[in-house]
Image (cartoon, rainbow, N blue to C red):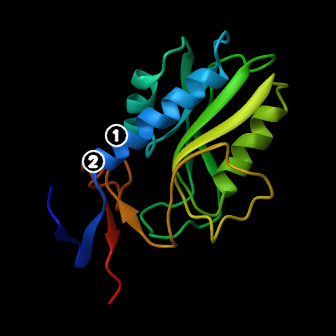
């Protein structure tokens, strides 16, 4: 675990350690398992960023579930979302009458989650909830609560643990934040 490193001329510092992430995921999984006891929800991971969080969360659950993935694009190679959301991979599951749990790596503006919520609620799910590892509470632009939050973070650019910088550094076990000059 490096405390600091440089990529593309930008300096990053350790923000959330792998151990803190694992401990928080365990707590989230326990809560979700209690909430869905007796149900078989569909967990839908938002690619590409959520794949590590999604995998670790699913393995901690004490309930049965189904999984699917959706892929959206709103960043490209930028550090800030463009706000223009495009679907790159559609769902392959039947939503109607099912408990749906969306798994996101990070919710900042909330525009992607809003896009997904509108898409899914048109298909009449039994319930719709969202779990995110990171929430930028100060910049979120949606008028509903995110159901399960790993960490609330300030407005900053973060990478690692599935979060990328121009499609790189997703493999890092910890989360790092950009050091502003």
Q: What element does badge 1 sit on?
A: helix
- The answer to which image quadrant residue 54 occupies is top left
* Number of the label disc, if any, that sits on residue 22: 1
Tell me what residue is drawn at x 79 percent, y 42 percent: 118
**C-alpha distance separating marks 1 and 2:** 6 Å
Q: Which mark is residue 93?
A: none
Q: Residue at x 39, y 64 (%)?
A: 158
The image quarter containing residue 8 is bottom left
View extreme (bottom): residue: 181
Q: Are marks 1 and 2 in contact (CB under 8 Å)?
A: yes
What number is the disc on residue 18? 2
Q: Is residue 7 above or below residue 119?
A: below
Q: Give the quarter of the figure containing the C terminus.
A: bottom left
Position of residue 7 measured from the top left corner of the image (x, y, whole percent): 22, 70
Q: Secondary structure at mark 2?
A: helix
Crowd tier of the residue under label 2, counting other residues whose Cα lies within 10 Å: few below 14, some 14–19, many 20 or above: some
Residue at image point 34% right, 62% down = 165
Q: Nearer the viewer, residue 173 or 36?
A: 36
Q: Position of residue 64 (x, y in %)?
A: 54, 11
Q: Residue at x 69, y 27 (%)?
A: 100
């Amino acid at each position: 675990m490096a405390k600091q490193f440089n990529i593309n001329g930008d300096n990053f510092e350790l923000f959330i350690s792998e151990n803190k992430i694992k401990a928080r995921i365990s707590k989230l999984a326990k809560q979700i398992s209690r909430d869905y006891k007796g149900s078989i929800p569909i967990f839908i991971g938002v690619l590409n960023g959520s794949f590590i969080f999604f995998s670790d969360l699913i393995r901690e659950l004490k309930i049965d579930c189904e999984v699917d993935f959706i892929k959206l694009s709103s960043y490209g190679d930028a550090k800030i979302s463009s706000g223009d959301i495009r679907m790159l991979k559609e769902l392959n599951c039947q939503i109607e009458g099912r408990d749906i749990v969306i798994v996101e790596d990070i919710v900042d503006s909330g525009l992607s989650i809003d896009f997904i919520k509108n898409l899914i609620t048109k298909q009449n799910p039994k319930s719709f909830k969202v779990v995110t590892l990171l929430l930028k509470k100060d910049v979120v632009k949606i008028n509903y609560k995110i159901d399960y939050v790993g960490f609330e973070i300030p407005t900053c650019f973060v990478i690692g643990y599935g979060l990328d910088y121009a499609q790189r550094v997703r493999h890092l076990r910890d989360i790092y934040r950009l050091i502003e000059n």
